[in-house]
Amino acid sequence: MKGMIGIKAKVALLVAALGLGAGGAGLAGHGAWQEKSIQAQVEKSGSPDQVQEPVQGTAKRTERVDPYGDPLPAGVISRIGTMRMRHPAARAVVFSPDGKALVTGGDAGFGVCLWDTTSGKRLHRFPFPGYARSFAFSGDGKTLISSDYSALWLVDVTLKLQPRVLVEPLEGNFFRVALSPDGQIVAVAEGPRGRSDEAKVITLRDTATGKELRQLKGHTEGVLALRFTVDGKTLISGSMDKSVRFWDVATGTAGRQFDAHEKSVLCIAFSGDGKLVAAAARDGTVQVRAIDSGKLLDNLIADKVGKAIALSADGKLLAFSGAGPAIRVWDMATGKQVHALETPWPAMSLTFSPDAKTLAAVGSTGSANRLWDLNAGRDVFSPPINLDAPSMLQFSEDGKTLRSGGGIKDLHDWDLKTGQESGHLFSGPNGSFAPGAFWSAFDLSSDGKTLAWVLRTIYDNKGFDIHLWDTAQQKELGVLTGHNDLVLRLKFSPDGKLLVSEDYKKSTRLWNVSAKAEVPQSKDHFDGIQCPVAFSPDNTMLASLAGDNIRLLDVATGKETRRWGSQQEGVRHSLAFSPDGKWLVSSTHREVRVWLVATGELLQRFAINEAFLSPVFSPTGRILAVEEFGSHRGGEGAEYRSDIHLWDWQNAQKIRTIELPQGAARSMAFSRDCRVLATGGVDATILLWDLTGQSIGEKSKAASITAAQLSTLWSDMAGAAPIADRAIWTFVLSPAETVPYLTEQMRPPVPLSAEKFSKLLGELGSDQFSTRQAAALALEKLGESAQAAIRQALKEKPALEVRQRLEQILKKSDTEMVRKVRAIEALELIGSAQTRMVLESVVTWSPDPRVVDTAQAALKRLANAVIK
């Protein structure tokens, strides 16, 4: 564009208005004594599912805010990133006439949002059931007209009136919309439902009544662009039929027509004086003509691919987003580029503020709406952080940092104490990539030292090579080659020594990371394996899908060791082992199932409305976090959101539900000490949720726990999951009082003499019912003292009635087993030398194999410093 002079410079002014596309530890305080009301509810309802749990953090306290001054939701410790100017899936943007507000819209469920351009705060969200494709303001700036596929909406931005449907298409969809300068007429391109290529007819309607005024017919393919001239007398349209047509608004008659474009016309713009019209085509060319004569004045090639164009109101600046990752801005008087505004993606929509000092873009940077101060040449809300929804979250081994990653080649290390970025784990080779490049797949080893990624661009499906990256040295370690199609999934083994990859054609490979080569045995045994896959915690087993079956493979040999039918319908999302490797969870978008690895036995199943995330076990394995996605809040036009259900899965009881204010969830992870759940939202923020039930922000020291309260807590440990969970954390957070008490409760029971047990066993077979009943009650009261003897007696195959009574006694002992298992978790989370001694003692004396297994797993995790 260098050296543009005369008409060429004037011509270039037009292009911009074209709008190609669519216009941990250390938490203080703890409220532990709310449980009596909950226990009463359980007793009254008879079911823990009917408990109305107190919302975390609802006690009187000073409102807590994030570093940007925005309130934190109840129960949230901190927010990483900002919710300002974050609109997921936005595809259209426009400034208000006074430039003080910005309107964004896009995918259904995220609504139409009104933003303050000074602070970046969201002023309001208007429920919008459809896909907000384009906007137009009335002259006074009080009314916004918006179109989706199914209706035209009038939105009162003063908030005095509710949004209303102006008109709904009787049989089809609205695909393009334009508003006359006086706001009295709206032009819409209508067509059959889902067929934009058939939207050939343009309808003019009265904006006050929605009444049809006239139809404009002439295009042979779908209309993609509509603009009124400055005086409102003429409507100009661009179409897939490669033509630009002029229409008389008053009569509906067709005027001039130009058919010089080689591809579909995407958008139209006018010069500031209204004398020139520019039309941009899909191939990036821009034709400029005089409106009065229709004469072709110039034919510009802006880029090989056009995405979005905007022209400032005074005609002095042109902004263009094409194939490259930067938005380019030119000074039209000199023809020189004055800004190259870096973005990860080409923008979907651009718009200048009325005073031409600010440029807004959506769709170019994940969920972030970007605003640039063009005088200063910088982002208005600099520095923009966490621009894309984090699809990966991982706590560091020391629990001090949180790693997050997303598809736009961002991998961050966040300091959990300050909430600030402590390190950028990925910068890329030479700091740059091809235009429009992103990760089609990536994974980070559990120690955070090695990153595997596959790069592709928005213009092709070439992403066959897997790159290995040293996050500490910031250098490439090597490239894994062998796939012949786009790689879509990557998964490291827990020790980071192996990597599984799967491509678009379902070809799955196993790689030796250090050797940078495919594992030989995988070539013989991986046929038919489907991702997702999961490595066992000890790296010895690989779980995968094969048709409707779950397969277990020996990693060393590649041979199948076990398989069973999953009997799950729907889209399969994930497989994951429990921390001790004994259980495997499989999930679809409708159901979660937990299996016993040793036998393939189904242990639990949870139905869900819809889900996109994989369930996640807490580090101790007690809690299973299950995401459920929906738009159930508020009916039609409700905001898309995810709930996170925390299940005490072995007892099939829900502990609590976290309603995410971040929209749909994209990732979640437990901290190593189980105190925090991190959730990454589609709004690109990360929230850290307190799972301990503490009153966040309470600085006063909690009162000492009395003996009576300790007794109540011990009773609660055998109760419903919400109550037991709070009891566990009260024990964990008050070790000075609770460790001695737990030590006493976990002492071995007084041994039962063989003579006494033999006598009671004989009485169980008495001819007298009263004698049998008295013996059964006596054995029940003996509790753990009698369990070992009862299990031995069952092995000796007693008489039927005696066996049934013994089995019933063991079944009733399950309540005590549940309490002991929960107590073991409390001891593990405290993690002191004394609690380890208690756990070691439990392993030696407990007659219940489930209690012994739990204690052994806890000791193993403590030895490996998993819980810190």
Image (cartoon, rainbow, N blue to C red):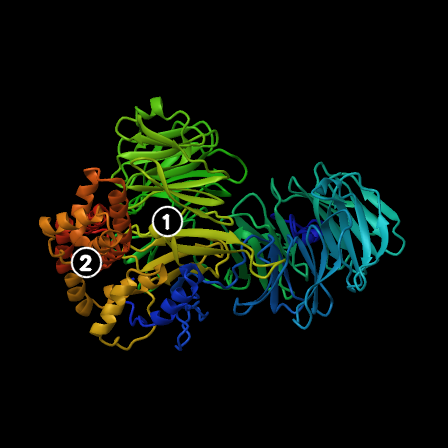
Q: Which residue is mark 1?
A: 616
64 is higher (above) or lower (below) than 262:
below
Res. 820 visible in picture: yes
Residue 21 x/y as whole percent: 64, 48
Closer to the camera in the image, 589 or 68: 589
SS of the residue at dot 1? strand
Closer to the camera in the image, 807 or 281: 807
Q: Residue at x 55, y 38 (%)?
A: 459
Asked if labels 2 and 1 touch by Cβ distance under 8 angstroms, the answer is no
Indicate the quadrant where residue 50 lies.
bottom left
Neighbour tally class for label 2: few under 14, some 14-19, many 20 plus, Cα within 10 Å: many
Residue 20 x/y as whole percent: 65, 48
283 is higher (above) or lower (below) than 252:
above
Residue 448 relative to residue 795: left or right: right
Q: Residue at x 73, y 53 (%)?
A: 177
Q: Residue at x 17, y 42 (%)?
A: 792
Residue 51 relative to residue 396: left or right: right
Sequence-wise, which precedes: disc 1 or disc 2? 1
Closer to the camera in the image, 641 or 786: 786
Q: Amino acid at mark 2?
A: Gly
Distance between the Cα atoms at labels 1 and 2? 23 Å
SS of the residue at dot 2? loop
Residue 180 x/y as whole percent: 78, 60
| Total numbered circles | 2
Residue found at the very far front of the displayed protein: 767
For the C terminus, give its image quadrant: bottom left
Residue 348 x/y as whole percent: 59, 50
Q: Which mark is residue 821?
A: none
Q: Amino acid at mark 1?
A: Val
Neighbour tally class for label 1: few under 14, some 14-19, many 20 plus, Cα within 10 Å: many
Q: Which residue is mark 2?
A: 831
Indicate the quadrant where residue 545 lies.
top left
